[in-house]
Structure formats: structure tokens, C-alpha cells
Image (spheres, grey):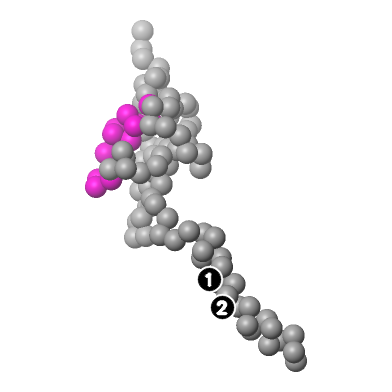
Amino acid sequence: MAETLLNVEVVYATPDQQIKKALQVPVGTTILQALELAEIPQVNFTELKVGIFSKILPGNHLVEEADRIEIYRPLMQDPKDARRQRASITRPIKARNKRN
């Protein structure tokens, strides 16, 4: 009897490139096992967060048919801080426009 295979996709993006690999893995494969099979160079999966379709999951989570396994890089800046910074730049301009 043949072993059942699942079709999954592993994706990883850097500022310079996007890596996307389609894999066939056996039933019972975990996220970390699939990442090892994808052989993405210079990526330490144990230090980065991983997930499926934007949902962060543990590395021992079993993959299912058509899963998109994503590797998440750390944020360079907190989104709330970035929003506050943008608002502080645009706020004086809006105040000037109201006076006119």
C-alpha cells in the first residue's frame, strides 16, 4: 500500500527576495519537519515564529493538505509606534489646514 502524501507550500520572505516551495510530505508531518524538507538556506526555524495562513502555531503542529506554511521574521518596529510616528508628522499639517 502506498503512503499518502499531502501537498503543502512553504513560504519565506526577506526584504530582498521571496522563497516559495511546493512540497509533498507524508501524512503525520509536523511544521518543523516540512520546513526541514524545504531546505531554505540560512534560516534558523527554532528562533523564528512559524504558522499556517497567518496563524502562529507550534512547530509540532501536524500539517494538512494545501497548508501554506509561513516563516515570520521579527518586526523591525512596533506597528503602534510606527502609527504614532506617522500621526505626529501629519498632525501639524492638518492643524494648519483648518486655520485657512
Q: Residue at x 63, y 78 (%)?
A: 91
Query: Tag 2, which secondary structure?
Result: helix
- Residue sitting farthest toward the top: 1
Residue located beneath label 2 in the image:
89
Residue located beneath label 1 in the image:
85
Gap in angstroms between the C-alphas marked 1 and 2: 7 Å
Q: Is residue 31 magenta?
A: yes
How crowded pointer 2 is (Cα within 10 Å; few <14, some 14-19, many 20+) is rated as few
**What stretch of residues is rendered in magenta?**
30-43
Q: Going by the image, does 9 lie left or right of 87?
A: left
Q: Residue at x 74, y 85 (%)?
A: 98
Q: Quadrant of residue 93?
A: bottom right
The residue closer to the viewer here, 65 or 96, is: 96
Q: Residue at x 75, y 92 (%)?
A: 100
Q: Going by the image, does 37 lie left or right of 13?
A: left
The residue closer to the viewer here, 81 or 12, is: 81
Q: Residue at x 36, y 12 (%)?
A: 2
